[in-house]
Amino acid sequence: MLSREFILEILRKSVHLVSVLIVLIYDFFGKEAVLWVLMLFLVTVLVLDYFRVEHGIRIPFFYIMYRKDEADRFGGHIFFALGAISVIALFNREIAYAAILMATFGDLAAALIGKFYGKRRVFQKLFKNDKSIEGSASEFIIDFIIGMLIVGNPIVSIVMAFLATLTETAVNKIDDNLIVPVFAGFFGQLTLFILTYL
């Protein structure tokens, strides 16, 4: 029987599946359109979080989407929007797509595989967390597949998958919804630049 907390975790992660919608809007309507959609989303959730964080108002349905440690701070969706805006604004289309989808599906794989099958907690001393090698390995594989499907370059895909996985595994206090797409996108774009001009 799945616990209530696990079901809520799946529900929270599923919200990030809007990343597919972000990619579709970008693909069909272009960069400017998707940036405006993301900015509208960001302004909306910032207003909602203002009432939630500053005034303690529980907004129906939305309040169940927050973890306990997000009770008095911004939720992950705000950082995800900032990360998506950053990579779309700065990097080429394929790198942006891959970075956004890695932040979603890699994180989802790490969370679900880590919770169900994670036994080897090898990162406790290095990163001071209980993330598992099984979760991190599944994230890397999913991220690499995403990179190959979208970018098509194995070297860029490995770099992006490695940085996304390392960042996700290493961070505990910084929100991974922001740092994963930014790091994966930045180093993916840098690698692509080096391969193109060397």
Image: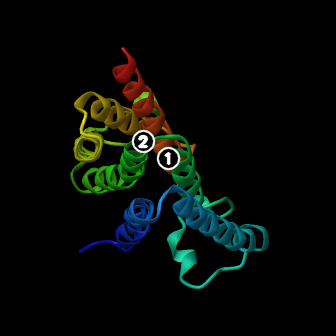
User: For the residue carrying disc 1, how many other residues have a C-alpha within 10 Å: few (<14), some (14-19), or many (20+)?
Assistant: many
For residue 86, above or below residue 28: above
Report whether residue 184 is seen.
yes
Name the residue at 25% across, 53% down. 113
Q: Mark 1 or mark 2, which has the lower sequence index?
A: 2
Circle 1 — which element?
Answer: helix
Residue 132 horizontal side relative to residue 49, left or right: left
- Kind of residue at disc 1: Asp
Name the residue at 41% across, 67% down. 21
Out of 120 and 186, give the one closest to the viewer: 186
Outermost residue, right side: 55
For residue 147, above or below residue 29: above
Residue 137 found in image quarter: top left
Circle 2 — which element?
Answer: helix
Pointer 1 with pointer 2, Cβ within 8 A: yes
In the picture of the structure, the residue carrying the numbered disc 2 is 168
Give how far across and how far down residue 43 sits, in percent.
68, 67
Instruction: Please state, as top left, top right, bottom left or bottom right, where the C terminus lies in the image.
Output: top left
Report whether residue 122 is seen.
no
For residue 155, above or below residue 9: above
User: For the residue carrying disc 2, how many other residues have a C-alpha within 10 Å: few (<14), some (14-19), or many (20+)?
Assistant: many
In the picture of the structure, the residue carrying the numbered disc 1 is 176
Residue 134 found in image quarter: top left
Name the residue at 53% across, 83% down. 61
